[in-house]
Amino acid sequence: MSGPVPMALGPFKFKAHGLGFTEMERKLDATWAELETAGRLNALQWTGPTSEVITIKGVAFPAEFGGEGTLNGIKMSARLGVPQILLSGGGRIYGLHAIEGVDEEGAYYDRKGAPARVGYSLKLRKIGFGFSLLSLLRGL
């Protein structure tokens, strides 16, 4: 079955009929250094972002719509340490991400031991590069 793809992690597509996702959470951490000052509140100096983590949660119904192969591919990519680019179906580029974790929960098992429903959660951490675009342009 083909249809709209609201999100893709490299070659792995999230879609309603297959590996669907229900939630996406983004967390950006940035640090500020506290500088002591005399006679007033301490000053803060921004030192930059430290990490950006995306958590994607969803559910698949392998017997009805598939999706198990896609989830297995994501797990293999995590095992091999292969970063993937995260893209939305609308063209938004979230950047290159390391797959730090895959949680999986099966339910409603059939006689063969296959789950009818698989809930999952992916933890993705954006990969930082040792340079910024501005520093790259300064070197020209």
Image (spheres, grey):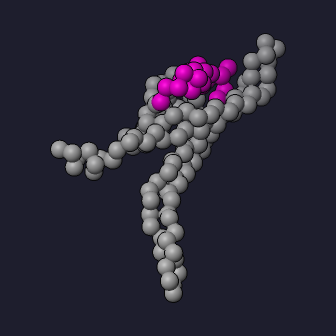
Magenta span covers which residues?
58-83
Residue at screen point 51% across, 87% down: 39
53 vs 115: above or below: below
From this viewpoint, which residue is outermost toward the bottom? 39
Task: Report the magenta stretch's main SS.
Answer: helix
Q: Is residue 120 magenta?
A: no
Q: In the rendered image, is residue 55 in sight?
A: yes
Q: Position of residue 30 (x, y in %)?
A: 50, 57
Residue at screen point 51% across, 75% down: 36
Q: In the rendered image, is residue 59 in sight?
A: no
130 vs 33: above or below: above
Q: Position of residue 57 (x, y in %)?
A: 62, 39
Q: Position of residue 45 (x, y in %)?
A: 44, 67
| Residue nearest the observer in this picture, 79 or 137 | 137
> In this figure, what is the number of numbered marks?
0
| Residue nearest the observer in this picture, 136 or 53 | 136
Image quarter hosting the C terminus: top left
From this viewpoint, which residue is outermost toward the left? 140
Q: Position of residue 43 (x, y in %)?
A: 48, 75
Tell whether 95 sits left or right of 34. left
From this viewpoint, which residue is outermost toward the right? 111
39 vs 111: above or below: below
